[in-house]
Image: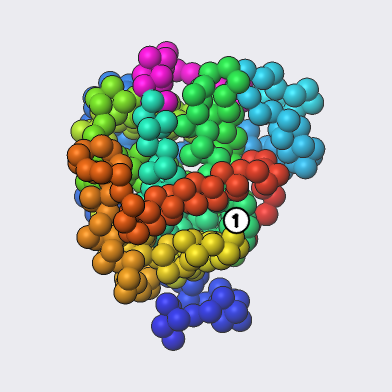
Amino acid sequence: MDAHRLSRRDALRTGGGLLGVVGAMALTARTARAEPWNWSPADSVAGGGDGADPLTKYDPDADTVLADVIDHADVPEVNRLLATWIYNDQPLPAGLPKNLADFIESARQLPAWADQGKLASSFEFNKKRGLYLGVLYAFASGMMSTVIPHEALAVYYSRGGSHLKERIAKTAKFGYDIGTVNAYGDGGEMIVTCVKTRIIHASVRHLLPRSPYWPAGVTPISQDDLMVTWHSLATTIMRTLTAWQVPIPAAESDGYLHSWQLAGHLLGIRDEYIPATWEQANAQASQQLDPILAPTAEGKDLANQLLNLGADLDLTLLSRGILGAFTRFVMGDKVADWLAIPREPVWSPLLEVAWGPFVAVREGVLAVAPVVDAPYWMFDEFLRQFALWYVAELRMPLSIEIPLTNR
């Protein structure tokens, strides 16, 4: 039977069947590199390090604590308490297990290299590019995650795979929080969001190996996996904006990078793996991200669910066809074909012809009269509606919680 035609019911009927086999093959392949790790830690924010392959490194400080919390603490009560911790400058709630509270207090500290001036420039970047960023976090980063085998499989077989809309809302919160004026300051939420996400990653590393669908001896979410995801967000966003010829002042570009460097640090990524410049980010991504993109049955299932999300709003401009056309336009034909996303007869050629001029007009590059043509209005309306959906997801009761189960 063709793995790409295997239904979820068929998979369950065969005890995980071909999905499990395909997943195991993909995971086993990422426990070693085809080429030796050769990215220099001298090019990182740390300026040095031992140069160890990030495929072999995890997050021992978080892992030890969360394994103990899951196995010995009252996790629902811990989650209830953590739900009240929202703001960066807010004290932790009383009653948390001491080892967890101690870990969080350490993990929430900004590194010495944090630069408030660069963070101010990052906010200017986000303020000007907010509509683009909402779309790119979804179609460049969100859809890319479905063709990153380790990430797609970890999501699919963990709790997130069976609660996908909730997981998307939490991811949307991450993208929203990093773009706020005080993201890492008093009253902001990005530090809390990062630390809670780090806690979830440690929980998944503890729980997912217990899943019958997960191959023995493979630990999910290595330092390499974290950096792959980092590149699918920060590096991919900047690559796309550059390809679209969006003019970005150097200070704002540096500021946006700095906001993601801090996010990586707070997520538990070792500083020696966090690139110091966009040039080094691109060099690292060419080794970590670009060569590993590939389809899996699980990723294809997740992508199908993502494309159907707009139907909940009953909005024409968020239809499956249009979301698919944007995915093909942003990610390219190869990825779209992997995910079995058909070429739209109207929107695909329209995007190819009109998106560049639309961006140029929106950025004020072209000295033209106010644009009222239907294609430009539709692009702008799509961006607006997508942003509304993106923010609406954050209005649902949302708490980043320690899971107790897999899929």
Residue underneath mark 1: 165
Percent from the top left, x then y, of residue 143?
A: 41, 57
Q: Quadrant of the N terminus?
A: bottom left
The image shows residue 49 at horizontal and vertical percentages of 31, 25
Say which residue appears at 69% left-offset and 50% top-offset. Answer: 404
Residue 155 appearing in the image: yes
Give the quadrant of the C terminus. bottom right
Which of these two is toward me, 371 or 87?
371
Q: Nearer the viewer, residue 73 or 352?
A: 352
Residue 307: horizontal and vertical position, in percent?
48, 64
In the displayed orientation, state which residue is furthest to the bottom.
1
**Residue 206, above or below 66:** below
Task: Look at the image and say whether residue 111 sits in the magenta stretch.
Answer: yes
The reply to whether residue 270 is in sight is no
Residue 151 appears left or right of 65? left
Q: Is residue 66 left or right of residue 152?
A: right
Q: Nearer the viewer, residue 4 or 203?
A: 4
Q: What residue sits 30% from the left and 44% below the top?
A: 370
Q: How is the image coloured?
A: rainbow
- What amino acid does circle 1 point to? Lys
Residue segment shown in magenta: 103-123
Q: Is residue 100 magenta?
A: no
Q: Magenta region's main secondary structure?
A: helix
